[in-house]
Image (cartoon, grey):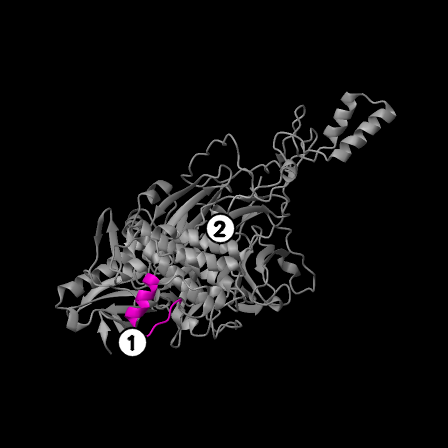
């Protein structure tokens, strides 16, 4: 068996102009990987070697969750190689062979890829070879950018490349300036992204030609084709969006991938994209229409017949002019201001924050309340009342609110839906929401960064970013706030939850050093994806990537870490394994989400649709038995979480009978009633979720015990 270092080669994945990519097995982490190797015939060419080695550095420099990560770099018998995540889901080119994608699916993919492309551009990296074959999918269907082999580094006025003055790129998606051999910046990639967008929605590239040269010439000379001629079912705004993205002049394109994605999102939502509104002509409104527009400083004008009627009433009843004026004021629309009696709207008062009984260590001091608080999204507007009683959220299952993720933002909602607040507004993907013991701070992950959010002041700050890491998949504080468990490149770290110490850490080596001096455990004998703590004690439930025969499968393993310094935890249990069967596990051996009540019971869901919705299961670790529970009788569920007192379950539900675009509802049900035939009603929450594959990742806020 051929090896490169410790990696066992299992097959060839593809060949390119300067490298060969193999599928391999890493026995240390028990996972499949992809290895890119510089052929022996190129090893003596310093140009190729330098270009090959720099690609690995570029990818490591990006550090974005939508860029295929580099795990390792090495050399075997004079042949340099680097190790990447194995993308088992194929490429976008493979998917497009089956036909065009829907508008919603296209938006989902670009929402994931756009931030990665913008991050590359912010760091002065231009990909220069964006194409469907370089967009790869993992086992869960998430897309990643790959193949930065011909990327250009732009630094101020300096542009460096390892291809000299050669025209590089793929002719079907190449920008005009790149095809002409001119200097390029990030807007060249925006053009290529527009060409890929055309292909995704039409099923074919924007231009066809017999030779690569004539194809590149069309990108230089011909206007972007009208996609509506190929797919007339699309909204007309899509054609305008593609024309802007593929404009010949880079100054006329979207300046970032984020702008393109935002415009596409507006189209999907049935709105007019902002770039079309900016270029729309100003309409000359008739004076009579303009006069009827509501004013911010005066009551709405009344039609002439209303004034005549008011005058007649004055004559009949003999009421003075001052009374008539009062009537007109009372006839003003609700909320319109009058010169004598302004009535500003008031928002519902915030619920009093619970008092923490166990403060988390080293939490930042409470920030002073801002002078003008932002109006929470979906908060009802009411008239002020001197006798109004402050809103008190209901307490159910030991919780008074739930934090969740929707459209890449964190929201906080009371369990009756009466008060809903948007806590973030940065558009970054977020995961692993966890409350700290003070019940005022949320810990979560964005990319490779750990963030802390104060839900009262809205202060949101980054504690640290683990630079050089391929993955930061999970960060979980212990219930007492003393410890922090992390999964970094699927290695498990348990360190003290000390904000000051964590802020100084930038590399995995810093975590190891913290473990050596004050920490508990570094463990890399299994590939850890997520974890949950017990209510007390030294058990830890880990979601791991294991092996079943020749396949990689997700499993939940319960470990005893009592002697954590020894570095060898004792395995107590593992499931589903041979304990019970999960529907769809044969095709998708994944566990999209799981939770533990901290004692005996687990909940988890399988994978059947929409990036992680599936049947819901419970597992009793004491009885070592599992079963499907599906509280609503049908599939599909995800992100089930136990209430703080362990008596309730919150979960997202999507009725499989509604088709793949079914809406997502949120339920909070008493666990003991599941299977009794009880009819459940979804929580009265606003329509948070814009896509059928959203991941709410609920975190119920505990109420401090007196």
x then y, percent, for residue 394: 64, 44
**Which x, y percent locates residue 659?**
59, 68
- Residue 276 image label: 2
Query: Is residue 29 at all visible to an observer of this figure?
Result: no
x and y percentages locating residue 629 in the rendered image: 60, 66
Q: Residue at x 49, y 32 (%)?
A: 370
Residue lying farthest right? 316
Q: Nearer the viewer, mark 1 or mark 2?
A: 2
Q: Which residue is mark 1?
A: 12
Q: Residue at x 34, y 45 (%)?
A: 502
Contact? badges 1 and 2 (CB < 8 Å): no
Label 2 element class: helix
Q: Is residue 182 magenta?
A: no
* In the image, residue 643 above or below residue 12: above
Nearer the N terminus, badge 1 or badge 2? 1
Is residue 258 placed above or below 49 in the rendered structure? above
Of 596 and 190, nearer the camera is 190
Instruction: Report the magenta residues as a range.
Output: 206-221
Could you tell me how far apart the alpha carbons at marks 1 and 2 are, in whole angstroms?
47 Å
């Amino acid at each position: 068996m051929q090896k490169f270092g410790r990696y066992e080669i299992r097959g060839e994945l593809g060949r390119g102009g300067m490298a060969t990519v193999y599928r391999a097995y890493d026995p240390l982490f028990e996972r499949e990987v992809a290895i890119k190797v510089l052929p022996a015939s190129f090893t003596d060419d310093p140009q190729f070697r330098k270009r090959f080695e720099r690609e690995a550095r570029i990818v490591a420099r990006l550090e974005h969750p939508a860029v295929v990560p580099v795990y390792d770099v090495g050399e075997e018998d004079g042949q340099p190689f680097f190790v990447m995540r194995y993308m088992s889901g194929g490429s976008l080119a493979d998917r497009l062979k089956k036909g065009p994608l829907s508008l919603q699916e296209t938006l989902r993919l670009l929402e994931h890829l756009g931030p990665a492309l913008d991050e590359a551009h912010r760091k002065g990296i231009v990909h220069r070879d964006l194409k469907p074959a370089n967009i790869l999918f993992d086992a869960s269907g998430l897309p990643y950018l790959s193949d930065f082999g011909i990327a250009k580094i732009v630094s101020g006025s300096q542009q460096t490349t390892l291809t000299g003055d050669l025209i590089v790129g793929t002719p079907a998606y190449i920008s005009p300036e790149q095809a002409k051999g001119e200097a390029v910046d990030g807007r060249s990639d925006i053009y290529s992204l527009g060409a890929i967008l055309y292909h995704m929605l039409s099923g074919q590239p924007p231009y066809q030609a017999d030779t690569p040269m004539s194809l590149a010439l069309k990108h230089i000379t011909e206007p972007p084709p009208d996609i509506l001629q190929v797919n007339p079912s699309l909204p007309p705004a899509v054609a305008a969006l593609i024309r802007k993205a593929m404009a010949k002049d880079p100054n006329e394109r979207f300046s970032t991938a984020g702008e393109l994605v935002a415009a596409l999102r507006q189209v999907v939502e049935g709105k007019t994209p902002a770039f079309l509104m900016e270029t729309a002509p100003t309409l000359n409104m008739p004076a009579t229409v303009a006069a009827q527009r509501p004013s911010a400083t005066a009551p709405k004008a009344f039609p002439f017949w209303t004034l005549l009627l008011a005058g007649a009433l004055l004559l009949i009843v003999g009421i003075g002019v001052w009374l008539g004026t009062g009537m007109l004021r009372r006839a003003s629309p609700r909320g319109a201001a009058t010169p004598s009696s302004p009535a500003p709207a008031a928002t519902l008062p915030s619920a009093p924050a619970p008092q923490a009984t166990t403060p988390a260590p080293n939490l930042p001091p409470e920030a002073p309340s801002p002078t003008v608080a932002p109006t929470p999204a979906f908060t009802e507007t009411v008239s002020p009342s001197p006798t109004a009683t402050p809103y008190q959220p209901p307490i159910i299952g030991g919780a008074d609110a739930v934090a969740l993720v929707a459209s890449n933002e964190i929201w906080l909602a009371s369990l009756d839906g009466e008060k809903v607040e948007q806590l973030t507004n940065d558009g970054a993907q977020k995961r692993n929401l966890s409350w700290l013991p003070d019940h005022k701070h949320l810990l979560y992950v964005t990319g490779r960064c750990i963030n802390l959010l104060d839900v009262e002041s809205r202060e949101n700050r980054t504690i640290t970013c683990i630079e050089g890491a391929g993955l930061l998949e999970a960060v979980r504080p212990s219930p007492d706030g003393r410890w922090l468990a992390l999964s970094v490149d699927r290695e498990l770290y348990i360190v003290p939850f000390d904000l000051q110490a964590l802020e100084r850490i930038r590399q995995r080596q810093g975590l190891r050093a913290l473990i050596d001096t004050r920490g508990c455990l570094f463990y890399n004998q299994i590939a850890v994806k997520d974890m949950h703590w017990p209510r007390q004690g030294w058990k830890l439930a880990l979601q791991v990537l294991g092996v079943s025969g020749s396949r990689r499968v997700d499993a939940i393993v319960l470990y005893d870490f009592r002697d954590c310094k020894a570095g060898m935890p004792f395995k107590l249990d593992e499931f589903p394994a041979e304990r019970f069967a999960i529907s769809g596990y044969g095709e998708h051996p994944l566990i999209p989400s799981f939770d533990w009540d901290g004692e005996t019971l687990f909940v988890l869901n399988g994978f059947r649709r929409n990036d992680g919705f599936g049947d819901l299961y419970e597992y009793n670790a004491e009885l070592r038995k599992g079963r499907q529970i599906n509280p609503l009788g049908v599939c599909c569920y995800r992100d089930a979480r136990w209430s703080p007192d362990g008596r309730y379950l919150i979960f997202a539900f999507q009725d499989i009978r509604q088709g793949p675009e079914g809406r997502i509802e949120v339920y909070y049900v008493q666990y003991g009633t599941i299977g009794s035939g009880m009819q459940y009603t979804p929580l009265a929450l606003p329509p948070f979720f814009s896509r059928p594959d959203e991941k709410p990742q609920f975190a119920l806020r505990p109420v401090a015990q007196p």
